[in-house]
Image: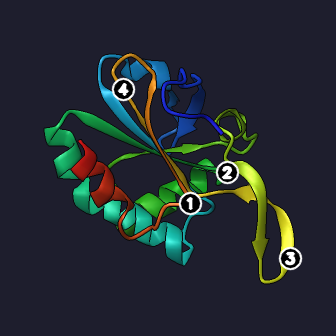
Amino acid sequence: MLKVGDKAPDFTLTDKDGKSVSLSDFLGKKVVVYFYPKDNTPGCTRQACAFAGAYAGFREKNVEVIGISKDSVASHVKFAEKYELPFILLSDPDRIAIEAYGVWQEKKMCGKVGMGVVRTTFLIDENGNIEAVMPKVKPDTNAAEILAML
């Protein structure tokens, strides 16, 4: 997994509106990039709703929020509409960013071991460097913790 001080790997992925979005599009401003396992699951929904609730605070500080999962664009559309998510959701079915950021890891669920996305949040500074890494975050408090950090 990447660490504080590392250059954040650039990526270009498709958002829920079918538009290509690159991390480098946001040079000059801070960006929160959070990786989550799956749309419409309890923890991921709580995390997304927490970011939605805190979004005005991020905007006041000129910070962009980007959520990334393996889900399809169509899944992101439904997820964003259902929960009124105002921030960018990116689809990474080929795990381009997921693997570049080191969040595709072995996980244990219900006694089974498999590979999956480990819920992780990165704060990236104006120059594209990693300012903070928060592995295995709690869905309900992640957004507030980052906002407090800013």
Amino acid type shown at disc 1: Lys
Residue 103 vertical position relative to residue 123 in the rendered view, above or below: below
Q: Decide: marks 2, 4 in contact (CB < 8 A)? A: no
Q: Position of residue 101 (x, y in %)?
A: 63, 36
Real-space Cα separation, disc 3 to disc 4, in angstroms = 37 Å
First in sequence, mark 1 or 3: give its number.
Answer: 3
Amino acid type shown at disc 2: Lys
- Closer to us: mark 1 or mark 2? 1
> Toward the viewer: 15 or 128?
128
Q: What residue would you read off at disc 2?
A: 70
First in sequence, mark 1 or 2: give its number.
Answer: 2
Amino acid type shown at disc 3: Lys
Q: What residue would you read off at disc 1?
A: 136
Q: Secondary structure at mark 2?
A: loop
- Closer to us: mark 1 or mark 3? 1
Mark 3 is surrounded, within 10 Å at the Cα level, by few (under 14), some (14 to 19) or many (20 or more) other residues, namely: few
Real-space Cα separation, disc 1 to disc 3, in angstroms = 18 Å
- Closer to us: mark 2 or mark 4? 4
First in sequence, mark 3 or 4: give its number.
Answer: 3
- Closer to us: mark 2 or mark 3? 3
Mark 1 is surrounded, within 10 Å at the Cα level, by few (under 14), some (14 to 19) or many (20 or more) other residues, namely: few
Q: Position of residue 92 (x, y in %)?
A: 66, 42
Residue 130 vertical position relative to residue 115 in the rendered view, above or below: above
Q: Decide: marks 3, 4 in contact (CB < 8 A)? A: no
Q: Decide: marks 1, 4 in contact (CB < 8 A)? A: no
Residue 132 is drawn in which quadrant? Answer: top left
Q: Secondary structure at mark 4?
A: loop
First in sequence, mark 1 or 4: give its number.
Answer: 4
